[in-house]
Image (cartoon, rainbow, N blue to C red):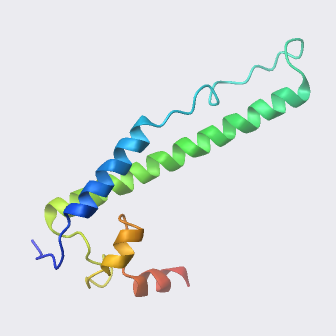
Amino acid sequence: MNQQLFDTAPFRQALLERRHALLNAQDGDASAVVELDQTRQGRLSRMDAMQQQEMAAETARRRALELTQIDSALARIESGDYGLCMRCDEQIAARRLEITPTATLCIRCANQAEI
């Protein structure tokens, strides 16, 4: 177990709050299957409904990804590895974690990964 150089309690609380918000988010009926019955719905209405369905599916995908990242960050807090870069094992700046509490890379390694 690595010794953390800062208090992780505020990060843990923020992560738990975001996780709770994501789990409670509702998309309504936007993800329902679009009927293709042309007698009940015009072409533009079907196209709009299909677009809304795709947007709802993408929102759900992003929500699931963020929940996975949050669960991973919470596990790192429990193990004592939170705030350590997964690439270089250096401390991630607290300011970076305040902005992106699920960050797994320090800013230097994150910038290198983008290249």
Number of numbered discs present?
0
Percent coordinates x, y for residue 40 in the rendering: 85, 12
Q: Residue 29, relative to residue 6: is it above or below?
A: above
Residue 97, above or below 111: above
Name the side, left or right, on which 52 lies relative to 77: right
Image position, residue 77 (x, y; %): 20, 62
| Residue 77 versus residue 5 in the image, above or below | above
Quadrant showing the N terminus? bottom left
Residue pictured at 56% horizontal, 85% vertical: 115
The residue positioned 53% from the left and 41% from the top of the image is: 60
Q: Position of residue 90 (x, y in %)?
A: 26, 85
Furthest-top residue in view?
39
Q: Is residue 104 in view?
A: no
Please name whichever residue, 94 or 66, is drawn nearer the observer in this view of the structure: 94
Question: Is residue 18 shown left or right of residue 82?
Answer: right
User: What residue is shown at x 36% (from left), y 47% (from top)?
Assistant: 19
Q: Residue at x 38, y 76 (%)?
A: 96
